[in-house]
Image: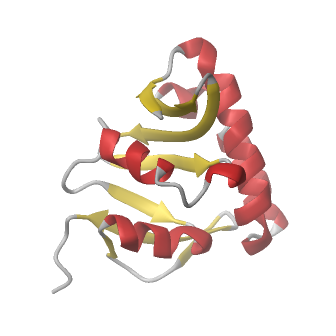
Amino acid sequence: MRIRKLGSEEIEPALALAWQVFLQFEAPDYTREGVEEFHKSIHSESYLAALCFYGAFKEERLVGVLATRNEGKHIALFFVDARYQRQGIGRQLFESAKQAGMTVNASPYAVEIYHKLGFVETDKEQVVNGLRFTPMEYGKSDE
């Protein structure tokens, strides 16, 4: 497995992978408004311009993507192709980008995954523009 930052020409395939995995695992937990909001965000030039993308490659195939914003302090996108989940790819992606105090707005599907990576909730589940999420932080003690 090879993890590296993605070049600008690789962003479109990374977003296609994110959309495919979102539809399969996360969209069932969202309203139509939430699905449309996610789709709008991954097609927004201003949103995408603020992201730093990492990709996981098995041979030459892109199988996972993680994107951060706010100078790497917030996970904006984190998706692994269904055929490659539970093989440590997500952990490898996270290890490449992690830093103490990193935050994420975890979808209902991903809360337990983030727990396994060392995140804790900082607030209860919220809904904004139809998107359900639980604010979480990495490396925060569970006081």
- Looking at the image, residue 19 sits to the left or right of residue 59; the answer is right
Report the quarter where the C terminus lies: bottom left
Residue at 49% across / 42% down in the picture? 66
Residue at the spot 55% in from the left edge and 39% down from the top edge: 65
- Asked whether residue 52 appears in the rendered view, the answer is no
Question: x, y percentage for residue 14?
Answer: 64, 32
Foreground: 132 or 55?
55
Q: Residue 121: horizontal and vertical position, in percent? A: 35, 77
* Picture layout, residue 130 above or below residue 23: below
Say left or right for 91 vs 16.
left
User: In which quarter of the view is residue 85 placed?
Assistant: bottom right
Tell me if residue 23 can be seen. Answer: yes
* In the displayed structure image, the side of residue 131 where residue 124 appears, left or right: left
**Which picture quadrant has residue 15?**
top right
x 42%, y 67%: residue: 114
- Residue 103 coordinates in the image, percent (x, y): 34, 58
Q: Nearer the viewer, residue 36 or 56?
A: 56
Q: Is residue 15 above or below residue 59?
A: below
Q: Position of residue 51 (x, y in %)?
A: 46, 32
| Residue at image coords 55%, 61% | 86
**Residue at the limit of the structure toward the bottom, as seen here:** 143
